[in-house]
Image (cartoon, helix red, strand yellow):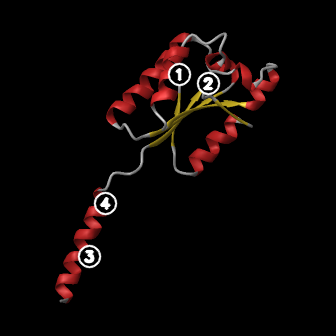
C-alpha cells in the first residue's frame, strides 16, 4: 500500500509539472507610428493563434494615445475586432496621458478601458506573474 501511495504521488506530481500554465502577457506601447501599432496587432494575433485562451492586455500611453482615439486611430478596425471577438484581450489607456492631452473617455474606441496610470498597471501585472513585452519598431 505504501508503494502504491508513493507511485500515485509521483504520477500526480509529474502531471502537475506538465500542466500548461496560464498564458498572461501585458504589452507596453508608447509609439504613435503605424508600424509599431501593426507590429503589436501581429503579435497579439500570433499569440491568439497558438494560445486562444491567453490573457492579453495592452497598456497604451504616451504618444500611442492616438491608437485608441475614435477620430485618430489608424488601426481602429483591427483593434475593435480584437476587443469584440476576444474577451481575453483588453486595451487599457493611461488616464494621466489622457488628462495631459485633454481627452476624455467618450473619445475612445468602444471597449477601450481607462486606468489611472499605465506604468502602475504594468507593474501590477508583473507582480501578478504576467509576462511583459515592450512593443517597438
Q: How many C-alpha atoms fall within 10 Å of the one at disc 1: few (<14), some, or many (≥20)?
A: some
In the shown orientation, is residue 12 left or right of residue 119? Answer: left
Of badges 1 and 4, the one in the foreground is 1
> Residue 110 bears which disc, if any?
2
Work out whether residue 113 or residue 34 is closer to the camera in this orientation and state it: 113
> Residue 80 bears which disc, if any?
1
Element on which disc 2 rests: loop
Of the image marks 3 and 2, the number of the one nearer the N terminus:
3
Of badges 2 and 4, the one in the foreground is 2
Q: Name the residue under label 3.
A: 9
Q: How many C-alpha atoms fall within 10 Å of the one at disc 3: few (<14), some, or many (≥20)?
A: few
4 relative to 10, above or below: below
In the shown orientation, is residue 118 left or right of residue 14? Answer: right
Q: How far apart are marks 3 and 1 (CA)?
A: 47 Å
Q: How many marks?
A: 4
In the shown orientation, is residue 94 left or right of residue 21? Answer: right
71 relative to 85, above or below: above
Of badges 3 and 1, the one in the foreground is 1
Position in image of residue 97 (x %, y %): 75, 26
Element on which disc 1 rests: helix
Position in image of residue 114 (x %, y %): 69, 33
Q: How far apart are marks 3 and 2 (CA)?
A: 50 Å
Of badges 3 and 2, the one in the foreground is 2
Quarter of the image that includes the N terminus: bottom left
Element on which disc 3 rests: helix
Q: Name the residue under label 4.
A: 17
Of the image marks 4 and 3, the number of the one nearer the N terminus:
3
Which residue is at 53% across, 17% downward? 37
Visible residue check, residue 25:
yes
Image quadrant of residue 49? top left
Amino acid at each position: 500500500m505504501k508503494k502504491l501511495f508513493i507511485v500515485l504521488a509521483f504520477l500526480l506530481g509529474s502531471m502537475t509539472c506538465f500542466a500548461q500554465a496560464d498564458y498572461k502577457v501585458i504589452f507596453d506601447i508608447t509609439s504613435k507610428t503605424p508600424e509599431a501599432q501593426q507590429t503589436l496587432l501581429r503579435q497579439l494575433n500570433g499569440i491568439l493563434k497558438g494560445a486562444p485562451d491567453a490573457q492579453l492586455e495592452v497598456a497604451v500611453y504616451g504618444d500611442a494615445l492616438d491608437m485608441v482615439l475614435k477620430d485618430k486611430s489608424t488601426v481602429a478596425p483591427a483593434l475593435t475586432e480584437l476587443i469584440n471577438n476576444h474577451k481575453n484581450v483588453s486595451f487599457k489607456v493611461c488616464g494621466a496621458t489622457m488628462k495631459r492631452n485633454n481627452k476624455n473617455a467618450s473619445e475612445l474606441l468602444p471597449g477601450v478601458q481607462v486606468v489611472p496610470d499605465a506604468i502602475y498597471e504594468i507593474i501590477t501585472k508583473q507582480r501578478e506573474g504576467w509576462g511583459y513585452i515592450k512593443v517597438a519598431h
